[in-house]
Amino acid sequence: MSLDAILVVATARESIADFLQALLIVYIIIIFAYIITSLIFSFGGRIPYSKWSSAALGFLRDVTEPYLGLFRRFIPPIGPVDVSPIVAILVLQIVGGIIISLIRG
């Protein structure tokens, strides 16, 4: 392989790793947003019959529940506190970091 081809492959791998890292950060922010909005809504901070608040919570729930549901099966709540999102975020960061470092080489 020529030097130009190697540089193109290295640049592509770096771009893929950067994209994956940005995607993981966005997903973690979405998980935090879901946790915060569900706490606010559970304490009555929601406008009754509001389309935008229902749509926002519905979107966040639809995006995060498939991933968080995996951890909720195995990690029971400790009293009223659900610790599964914390474990889910830690696992996401660890696995994501490993995958990103493998892609970068």
Image: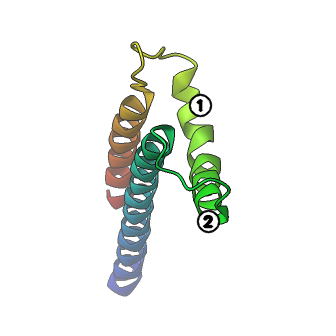
Q: Quadrant of residue 65?
A: top right
Q: Residue at x 54, y 23 (%)?
A: 72
Query: Where is the N terminus found, in terms of image quarters?
Result: bottom left
Q: Residues within 10 Å of mark 2 (few under 14, many from 20)?
A: few
Q: Which residue is mark 2?
A: 52
* Residue type pointed to by label 2: Trp
Q: Quadrant of residue 64?
A: top right
Give the total number of marks visible in the rendering: 2
Q: Residue at x 68, y 56 (%)?
A: 49
Residue under the image location 36 percent in, 86 percent down: 4
- In this rendering, would 28 be left or right of 51? left
Is 5 displayed left or right of 94 in the figure? right
What residue do we see at 67% from left, 63% from top? Answer: 51
Q: x, y percentage for residue 24?
A: 42, 55
- The residue at which mark 1 appears reads as 69
Secondary structure beneath dot 1 equals: helix
Give the color scheme: rainbow, by chain, secondary structure or one colour.
rainbow
Using the image as rendered, state which of residue 11 and residue 30 is in the foreground.
30
Question: Residue 59, located in which quarter of the rendered image?
Answer: bottom right
Q: Position of residue 12 (x, y in %)?
A: 43, 75
Question: With respect to residue 12, does 77 lie above or below?
Answer: above
Q: Alpha-carbon distance for marks 1 and 2?
A: 24 Å
- Looking at this view, is 58 or 23 the one in front? 58
Quadrant where the C terminus sits is: bottom left
Circle number at residue 55: none
Residue 24 sits above or below residue 9 on the image: above
Q: Position of residue 69 (x, y in %)?
A: 59, 31
Residue type indicated by callout 1: Gly
Q: Nearer the viewer, mark 1 or mark 2?
A: 2
